[in-house]
Structures are given as C-alpha cells and as structure tokens.
Image: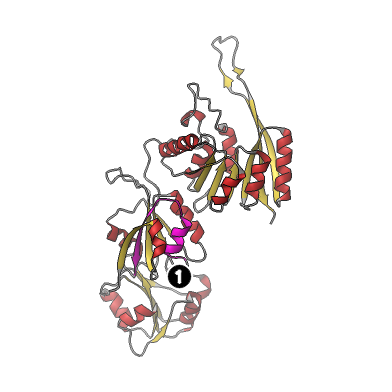
Amino acid sequence: MADRITVIGWDGTPLTQAAAGALAGATLVAGAGYQLAALPVPERAERIGLADLRAAARRIADHRGTAVVVAEGDPGFFGVVRTLRRPEYGLELEVLPAVSSVATAFARAGMAWEDAQVVSAHGGRLRRAANVCRAHPKVAVLTTGGAGPSELALMLRGVPRTFVVCEALGTPEEDVTVLTSERVPDHDWRDPSVVLVIGNVPPADAASGWLAGKPLDHPGAQRGWALPNRAYAGADAEGRCPRALPPHVRALALARLAPAPGDLLWTVGAGDGALAVEAARFGAAVVAVEAEPADCARISANARKAGVEVETAAGAGPEVLGALPEPDAAAVEQGGPAMVRAVAARKPERVVAVARSLAEATETRRVLDAAGYRTDALLLQSAPLRAEADEDAGPSFGRGDYTLLIWGEPYD
C-alpha cells in the first residue's frame, strides 16, 4: 500500500497549503484529465486517470510511495472516498475537501438548499433521478455522459420545471444556463457537474426546515398516514368520502405498494386522490388518473393541501395509460379487470387492485396470474364502534362496509 494517500477536493480555486504540499510530494497522482493538466503535478509522479475508479484504487493499493487523488469539490459527497474506502483495498485516507459542486451550483443560482434533494444519475439511475424530480420541487442531479440535462428533460416531458445547467464548474470554461425544461433538449451540453431542477418552490420567506434534504414543513399537512377521509376535499359534513378508499384499506394498499423516493406510482381511478397523496408523502412520484377534469382538480387541491406534488391525467379507459411514464408500482382503485390487465402489461413491480365483488376479485387474480404475478387477496370488513347517548345501552357498531383488495408481485 502507498505510504500516504491524500484525497484532494478541487473546485478550481487555488489549492490550500496542505493540498499543495501533498501534491508536491506525490509519486503517484490520480485524477481527471483536465485536473492533471491544470494542477502542478510533479514531473516524476506517475499519472493515472479515474475513468475506472476500482482499477485506480487497485493501482494505488499496489503503489509504494506517496499517492494523491484529485477529485471534484467534496470527494466525500457522491465522490471517490466511498470506493477508495472499500475493505478490499485496505487504504487509509487523509481527505482535504473543497466546496462541493452541489453547494457551488446553488450558490450560482442564489438559492438556499437545505431543503433540496440530491441525487446521482450515475450507474444507470437516470430514471429514478427523474422520478425524484417529479416528486420534489428542488433537486440537484449529478449527471454523467448519456445521462445529462437533455436525457433528464426528455424523461420529464409535461412536468413544468426550470433547469439550471452548470457546466464545468470551477474551471475557466464554467457556464451556467437557465432554461425551461422543454428547451433543454435543443442544446448540446458538455459534461456538467450538476443540474438543478426547480419546480414550484415555497416563497423565500417561508420558515426554514430543520432536517436537511426534507421538504419544508407544510402548514396544512397532517402527521401520520391512512388519514381519516375528512382530511381530503370531497368528504361530506360527517367525514364520509365515497370517492376515497377507507383509511384501513389505504393502509394495507400502501404497505403492499411500498412507495419510496425514486419510485413512480400510478393510481388509476384515483377518486379524490387520498391514496395518491399519501403515496406522495412517502417520497414517490405519483400520477393519478381520473375520468373528469373536475376530479383531477380536486386531486391537485388535496395534494397542495398536503404539501406534495401529484400529477394528474384525465381519462377513463385503458388507452389513457399509453402516454404515462413507466410505473414501479400501480394501484387500480376503479376500472375492474380490464384496467388491471392494461396496467399489468406495463410490468410494474407491485400492483394493488380493488374489486367490487367476489367474481371481480376472482377475475382480477386470473388477470394478474396470467401476467406473471404472484397474487394474494383479502376481504377487509369493518364497522365503526360508536358510543350510544344512553350509557346503559353501551357502545354499538355503526354501519359496516367491506372491501376486496388484491395485490401481486412478479415471480422471481
């Protein structure tokens, strides 16, 4: 192993005394081509690139001498430190960070960013990064070749966003461009350091949050999940909401759908959007499908009240699904076996469906079985326990209801 390994974060500004001293004494220097060309690398030092980081780590582990790794910005934040610290290399590191590219990008935009989501599109994760951009109004995306601003903007077609594209941050060729998302694919971009994807961000005077990476607390949002129906627009004076699944059914549906950041969830026949909103509160991107524009407007109102983003699509038949982005999970609240068949054809990892009768539940299971899903189902029956005005009579049950819920996951 090298006698000493120093990881230097470089943001284009002059090196600190400690970083300059480590570089001057290095017998091996690893970094990107532009970094090795711009920095005063000793002539005697071996130079290696970081295109294959694991190969570079093996070479550093075999080196006898003093090694320096030059990384962009903060090498401990989506950087080289994680790979270099893998146990198989046995490397002990001294890390000298600079300002991260994400912090620099938000500084260029003049924006606070403790409430931002930060995602990486490296390693084939562009689709998941795009889903986070659908679900959150302030996202920094670390991009790479083939997963840059244009590809990201194409995945966000129809989602109103502003892109702040930061190319070559910290170099003399630095360029920061602000465009609406539909104009981004019209440009040829250099490999940028970071892209900010900005939606409807709360006003600047909104109270700051306390937990980095989480959206600001929303004054209208309630704690918990599987909320009572009265929490949603569309409920009557007694809290009944015929267009929403009962809370206990939503709880099981959410457990089977398992929405998470980076996922895209469909709710088809979304009613008043209760299930869609609660899935969005788990961090997933959500598209809610309903037949009438007025229903879609009610879903959007419920999403705003909860402080989340839910896209809506107006339509009733299976054909409406053709224009939607690929789902990771889907709930068919209304539409029956025909809609379940159309959803299953898109191969989401998790499907939940509501049936209105035992015959419909049986047919829905057949549809999912034929599509290659392992299925299960429950009949959920409930009745509220209410206290009677007459204390001698004691409590009694109110009017009950039942719901048939079917779910499936593909066979391994």
Q: List the single residue furthest toward the bottom.
A: 44
The picture places residue 400, in percent across and down from the top left corner, at: 63, 23
Q: Quarter of the image holding residue 358? A: top right
The picture places residue 283, in percent across and down from the top left corner, at: 47, 48
Which quadrant: the C terminus? bottom right
> Mark 1 falls on what kind of element?
loop
Of the pair 105 and 384, the residue shown nearer to us = 105
Please give the name of the residue rendered at 70% of the width and 49% of the height, measured from the top-left corner: 374
Residue 39 covered by magenta stretch: no
The picture places residue 48, in percent across and down from the top left corner, at: 43, 82
The picture places residue 4, in percent across and down from the top left corner, at: 39, 79
Of the pair 13 and 196, the residue shown nearer to us = 196
Report whether 252 appears left or right of 283.
Answer: right
Image: magenta residue range: 147-167
Residue, disc 1: 145
Of the pair 406 and 87, the residue shown nearer to us = 406
Please give the name of the residue rendered at 55% of the width and 41% of the height, measured from the top-left corner: 315
Report whether 335 appears left or right of 77.
Answer: right
Please give the name of the residue rendered at 47% of the width and 75% of the height, measured from the top-left corner: 53
Residue 163 covered by magenta stretch: yes
Q: Is 151 drawn above or below residue 88 in the view shown?
A: above
